[in-house]
Image: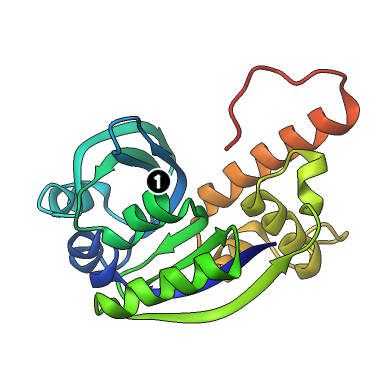
């Protein structure tokens, strides 16, 4: 039975500590992580919240990433691709050795909030043991057993997209009149308004495609 665990990890024990410390107003959200055949771990992540030029200057001196590239630009946010170096030992270990899945990761100057799925309780325990043995500080906030397939799977939603829609519903975003604006909802979720808008767009696209059409368009999920 798989286990979903939510952690808080100090930035200096994870990734992009130098860049986030130099630009504390910025928020990083990892969108996707790709493990290559050469055992390289390549994250794609959105950055929002402030001056991207300042962030990119600090980015170049950050020892946790290399081979940095700007993939996309939208108002207030940019999508980057990079390669994690060996300094990000926890993630490399989780991917290569344990086969864990990083479901969500949001980074700020102080810490990262991580949501990771492990194949079993033993794998989670092994990950915790590894962190303790390597003096990697973390706080396990909560765990959840995934007894059944996630409800979002049948609608082709990613965990982040499902969380966005449910949070908006609970906050009264869909009420008439709305109980909360998109800007207020974005602040509540700790992301940029443009990032939230992108999540809505991707979630609506996947939801409509999976329920109202016969075949899926050839389009990657956000």
The one of 176 and 40 positioned closer to us in this rendering: 40
Can you tell which quarter of the image residue 29 is in? bottom left
Instruction: Report the side of 176 relative to 159 (left or right).
Output: right
Instruction: Report the side of 210 relative to 76 (left or right).
Output: right
Residue 113 sits above or below residue 37 on the image: below
Residue 69, horizontal then vertical, whole percent: 26, 33
Can you tell which quarter of the image residue 121 is in? bottom right
Quadrant in the picture for the N terminus: bottom right
Residue 49 appears in the picture as rendered: no
Residue 171, horizontal then vertical, whole percent: 76, 69
Q: Which residue is mark 1?
A: 45
Quadrant in the picture for the C terminus: top right
SS class of the residue under badge 1? strand
Instruction: Report the side of 79 relative to 87 (left or right).
Output: right
Residue at 65% across / 38% down in the picture? 202
What's the colour scheme? Answer: rainbow
Q: How many numbered marks, from 0 up?
A: 1
Residue 32 sits above or below residue 19 on the image: above
Residue 208, horizontal then vertical, whole percent: 82, 33
Residue 80 sits above or below residue 51 on the image: above
Residue 118 sits above or below residue 208 on the image: below
């Amino acid at each position: 039975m798989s286990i979903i665990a939510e952690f808080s990890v100090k930035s200096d024990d994870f990734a992009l500590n130098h860049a986030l410390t130099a630009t504390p107003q910025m928020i990083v959200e990892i969108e996707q992580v790709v493990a290559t055949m050469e055992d390289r771990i390549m994250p794609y992540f959105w950055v929002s919240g402030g001056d991207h030029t300042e962030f990119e200057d600090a980015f170049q001196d950050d020892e946790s990433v290399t081979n940095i590239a700007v993939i996309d630009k939208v108002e207030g946010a940019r999508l980057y691709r990079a390669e994690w170096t060996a300094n990000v030992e926890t993630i490399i270990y989780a991917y290569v050795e344990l086969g864990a899945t990083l479901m969500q990761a949001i980074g700020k100057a102080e810490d990262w909030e991580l949501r990771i799925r492990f194949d079993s309780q033993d794998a989670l325990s092994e990950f915790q043991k590894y962190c303790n043995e390597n003096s990697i500080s973390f706080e396990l906030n909560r765990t959840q057993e995934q007894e059944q397939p996630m409800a979002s799977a049948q609608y082709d939603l990613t965990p982040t997209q499902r969380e966005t829609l449910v949070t908006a519903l609970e906050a009264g975003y869909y009420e008439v009149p709305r109980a909360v604006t998109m800007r207020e909802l974005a602040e509540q979720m700790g992301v940029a308004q443009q990032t939230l808008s992108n999540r809505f767009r991707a979630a609506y696209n996947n939801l409509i495609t999976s329920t109202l059409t016969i075949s899926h368009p050839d389009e990657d999920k956000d």
